[in-house]
Amino acid sequence: MPVHNAEIARLFEQLADLLEVEDANPFRVRAYRNAARTVSNNSKSMADLLAGGKDLSKLPGIGKDLAEKIRTIVETGRLPLLEEVRARTPAALSDLMKIEGLGSKRVKVLYSQLHITCPEDLQRAARSGRIRELEGFGRKTEEMILHRLEHFGDAQARTRLVDAEETVKPLLAYLQATRGIKDIVVAGSFRRRSETVGDLDILATASRGSPVMDRFVAYDQVAEVISSGKTRATVVLRSGLHVDLRVVPQASYGAALCYFTGSRAHNIAIRKIGVRKGYKINEYGVFRHDKRIAGKTEKSVYRQVGLPCIEPELRENSGEIEAAGKNRLPRLVSVDDIRGDLHCHTRASDGHDSLEEMVTAARAKGYEYIAITDHSKRLTVAHGLDEKRLLREIGQIDRLNDKLDDIVILKGIEVDILEDGTLDIQDKLLGQLDLVVGAVHYKFNLTRRKQTERIIRAMDNPYFNILAHPTARLINERAASEMDMEKVMTAARERGCFLEVNAQPVRLDLTDSHCRLAREAGLRVAISTDAHSTKGLDHMRFGIDQARRGWLEAADVLNTCKLPDLRKLLTR
Ligand code: DGT
Ligand code: CA
Ligand code: CA
C-alpha cells in the first residue's frame, strides 16, 4: 500500500514535537514542521513523485536530507530518527502536547520538573495542586489544565472526517478489487458527513461474503482483528480507527444502506412508522408477513413508509421526518451552487501560493469571483499586512483584474478583531476594499458577555462584512469561544453583516446547528475555504457538508449569488 502524504506529514510533526521537548535547535524543529506542511499541501503524492523519478529536494523547504527521509518513509513506512527519539522519550508526551494551552515548552517543564509523561499524571498533579507551583504556570493555568483534561478523552476518541476520508480511500480501493464484489460504500456517520466519526461502517454487496471478509482482515494496515465472520467483521487500523464491515445480498442493499447510515434515532423513528403500517423493517428489507416488499434501494424503503428519500446529512431525527411527511424537505445547497470563494490567502501573508496561482486555481473551478483576504498586521506570525503592504496588494489585484475577463478578484482582508472590538486596519483603507472579513485570533477566553460585545462592536464598523470562523474552535484541539451566538446573529442581520462557515476540515466553524440557527434567523452565511494554498480551495466541499447538515439551501448562502448581487449585499 502506498504511504499517504498525510502519514508522512504526521511523522514529521511528531518528530518536531518531540525534538522541541528535548530542547533541540529551533531551526531544526521548524525545518521538520515546514516539511510536514509542504508534503501535506502537495496535491501529488510523494510516493507517485518518487515513482516518477522526481527529485524531491526541489520541493520548497525540502533539502537533500529531508528528501532522503521522505524516500525512506515511502519505502518502509518508517522514520528511523523518530523511532530513535521516541525510544528515549515517553510515548504519551505527544498526547500531552495535544492538550490546548500546553505547547512543547510547557510539556518540557512538566516532564523535567515533575516527571509528568501522560495525561493521567498531569491530572493527578493538577488535582494535588503541584502544577501551580511550577514557574510560568500558576493557579489559573492549573484550573485551565483540569478543565481541558475533562474533555480531552472524549475528543480524542473521535476522528475528524477528513482524516477518516484519507484512511478509508485506499481501503475502499483495496476491497473493490475483491472477486464477486458489487457495491461498496461507507455508511454511518461518515455518510451523514458528521464533522467527526467514532468508527467507520463499510457496507458491501457480493454474491458471497467470505472472500470480502478474508481480504478485509488481510489488509496490511490492520493492527488488530476484533471479530470476523462470514458477513461481518470489525478491525482496528494502525491509525487507531475502528472499521466495521458488513456484506449483504444485493436485494437488501437499500435496506442495509438505510440501516447502517443511521442515525440510530432516525432509524428507530422510521421503523415506528413502518410498524404502524404493519411492516417490519431491518437491514435486510421491508417485510410484510415475512415477505420482502422493499429494500433493493433506499428510495424503495422510504417509499414504503410513504416518504420521499431523505438526504443522509439530514438523518438525525431532528425534524426531517416531519418535513419529509409534509413534502417540505430543504433543497440542500451543493458544491455546484458555489460561485466563488470569499476567504483565502496568498504568499503576501501566510499562504503558500502567489496571487496569480490562487486566481488560476479559482478560474479552473469555474468560479466567477475570488476574494483575496490576507492577514492584517497584528498577526505577525502570519506575516500580516500593514496599510502600506495592503495598498501594494490592492494595486497588484487591480492590475491583474485588468488582464482577466472570466473571473473577478475581490480585494479583501482578514482583519484582526482587537480585544476592544476595533479593527486592526484604518477605516480609510478598509473603505477601499470590496469586502472585509473580520476574525478573532487571540483572547479566545474572554467571558461570554465580553466576547459577544467584542464581536458586535467589530460589526459596528461600517466596512465589516463577514465574521470568519466565528467561534475559533479547532476540532479535537481547541474548544469554541464562549459567546451568545443568537445575539451575534441578530446583530449581524441588523447590520447587514454575515457569518462564515469556515470549510477547513479542522475548523468547520460555524457548526451544523449554528447553520440551522442562522437559517431560522434569516441570516445568510458565507461558505469559505480560508485556503492557504491552491489545494486548500478544494476544501469547499467540507463546508458544504456542514451547511447541508444545517439544512441550508443555495439561497441561504452568500457565495451562491451572482457577482452584482453579491456586491449589493457587501455594500452596507
Ligand atoms: P459514530 O460511529 O459514533 O460516528 O456514529 P454512527 O452513526 O456511525 O454509529 P455506529 O457506527 O454505532 O452505527 C452505524 C449505524 O448503524 C448507525 O448510525 C445506525 C446503525 N445501527 C447500529 N446499531 C444499531 C442498533 O442497535 N439499532 C439501530 N436501529 N441501528 C443501529
Ligand atoms: Ca460509525
Ligand atoms: Ca460502527
Image: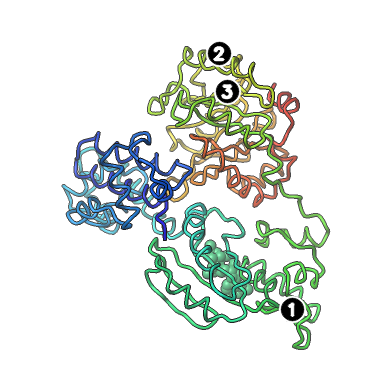
Which residue shows up at 79% across the image and 71% down it?
305
Q: For this view, does 93 lie left or right of residue 524?
A: left
Residue at the disc numbered 2: 395
The label number, if any, that marks residue 478 in the structure image:
none
Of the two numbered discs 1 and 3 on the same chain, state the one appearing first in sequence: 1
In this view, 210 is above or below 143: below
Q: How is the image coloured?
A: rainbow
Image location of residue 150, percent across then percent down: 39, 55
In this view, 383 is above or below 452: above
Q: Amino acid at mark 1?
A: Val
In this view, 376 is above or below 501: above
Which residue shows up at 60% across the image and 15% down it?
398
In this view, 191 is above or below 365: below
Q: Secondary structure at mark 1?
A: strand
Label 2 near label 1: C-beta < 8 Å? no
Q: For this view, does 309 lie left or right of residue 196?
A: right
Q: Secondary structure at mark 2?
A: helix
Residue at the disc numbered 1: 286
Of the two numbered discs 1 and 2 on the same chain, state the one appearing first in sequence: 1
Q: Cα distance, mark 3 to mark 2? A: 12 Å
The reply to whether the residue tagged 2 has its Cβ within 8 angstroms of ligand 1 is no
Residue at the disc numbered 3: 412
Q: Cα distance, mark 1 to mark 2? A: 64 Å
Label 2 near label 3: C-beta < 8 Å? no
Q: Quadrant of residue 106?
A: top left
Q: Which residue is farthest bottom? A: 289
Q: Amino acid at mark 3?
A: Gly
